[in-house]
Image (cartoon, coloured by chain):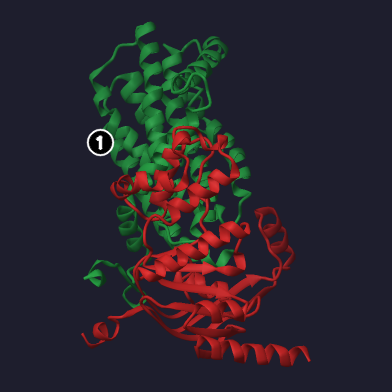
Amino acid sequence: MQQSKKQIYDSTKRKHPAIEELLALFQYKDLIMQLTRRNIITRYKRSALGIAWTMLNPLGTMIVMSVVFSRVFNRTEAYPVYLLSALLGWQFFSQTTSGCMNSMLWGSGLFQRSYLPKAGFVVSTVFSGIINLLFSLVPLFLIMAIIHVPFRLSLIALPLVILILAGFTLGIGLLLSSYVVIFPDLSEMYPVLLTAWMYMTPIMFPEDIYLDILGGWILKLNPLYHILRLFRMVIYDGVFPTSDQWLIATAISVITIFIGWMVFTKQADQYGYRV
Amino acid sequence: MAQSTSNLNLAIRLHNVGVEYDMPTDRINTIKEYSIRLMQGKIKRKKFWALKNVDLEISQGEIFGILGRNGAGKSTLLKVISRVLIPTEGDVWICGVVHPLLQLGAGFHPELTGRENIFLNGTILGHTKKEIEEKFDEIVDFSEIADFIESPLRTYSSGMKARLGFSVATAWMPDILVVDEVLGVGDAAFQQKCSERMLYFREHGSTIILVSHSPNTITNLCERAIWLDHGNIVARGNASEVSAQYNTATMGKRL
């Protein structure tokens, strides 16, 4: 009777690592919940302001940047909202992808001792990132109300836009995490890449100044541009993206997850040999 | 069908398992170093078999010993059994969940409370939230930290942390318990506690795999054993006979 309860592992009946890891993730869903909880709790526990910090942090950045850039870009209407609509998405992306690598490094101490679905460390980081992003929308809406930027119907598309960005972030997080176990210094080099990437993406600067660089290819080839512009459209411009724009962003997101998942599960199979 | 009947009382079966490491001769841990060496053409790779042609069957409920010197492949074999390492060749069949005995506090977080850490550590061991809720009071009682359960772990003494880690790790009866004595840590009292737990699990049906480089330990605790040398099984069978062979061989080398 006990025999039937025990789970059987048979290497001759192994599925493809990409499928096996996915099934294991569902089996360990409570672990993902606990890791997500841990990420949220530990981020705020020691700060006196607690969860309010997520909201004050972008607010502070926004105030500094608005004061500095509002005069430079005085052509841009309601610059604080122009900035913040894309900046929140960017901050989610940069913090979450870095966080994925740290979570993976922390987890490597565990999965060198017993079996765990390694992707759980990446997935839980993306989950906690989404929760932080939702909190940071509160100050954005507050600023919109204060400087009289209208709340338009297009805002109902925001959850879908967040989902597309989260997918892209998961894909990149998986790719980075695949290699950070082998090369831990990847997590130190990554911020340099992030800084460059941020300046290549229209977040602080008006979009039209990028159009002259390399004939606009700097934008066309930048996957984050195609996703972050959706944020700006539904929040700042108050318009729904066209079907082409949805399609490009969704395709980028889905393809990145797919590549990230295949690379990650292939690499994760070999971690045992890397100790 | 015939195969499933023959597996009925087995906990672990390895068939022709081999693990081949293919690694740079020097440890290269940074991208910088890797790129420099790559340009200089200085990455020399070394291939070697840490395990070769390992066939092994371990029955449910037995204490099985793995004997061998440092570098004989004992830890690699444990990794294969724990599914941490997927062998280069051969088949692995395991019935039940494999737990290492000493996972003390590897998944603890100093900022979380004792309660939160119990849930985090429990899910790392593969249990569901519901299973942890059922065992929660028992874990708290056994670790004797009831008054501090809502305090962050950083306020705990090292003894309290060790007790909590041990209580979580041993709250559930493992199907297969893996004990690497070579890595054994802790004071005498703690090791005593570990031994007691091991015997308790054994009485209640857990399969135990004990890794050691001491023939005495293997003879005292195990029924059957293997002797690993250079990744091959050189002797197998009754624990005291295998230990005797091991003793004779190592004595011979010393003389």
Residue A99: image location, x then y, percent: 50, 40
Chain shaded green: A
Total count of labels: 1
Q: Residue at x 34, y 25 (%)?
A: A233
Q: Residue at x 43, y 61 (%)?
A: A115
Q: Is residue B228 visible?
A: yes
Q: Quick check: B165 left or right of B171?
A: right
Q: Residue furthest right?
A: B255
Q: Residue at x 25, y 66 (%)?
A: A5
Q: Is residue B61 above or below residue A83?
A: below
B9 or A8, which lies in front? B9
Q: Quick check: A230 left or right of B235?
A: left
Residue B240: image location, x then y, percent: 54, 87
What residue does disc 1 label? A243
- Local secondary structure at mark 1: helix
Quarter occupied by the N terminus of chain A: bottom left
A150 or A122, which lies in front? A122
B193 or A104, which lies in front? B193
Chain shaded red: B
Q: Residue at x 27, y 32 (%)?
A: A242
Image quadrant of residue A116? Answer: bottom left
Residue A124: image location, x then y, percent: 40, 43
Quarter occupied by the C terminus of chain A: bottom right
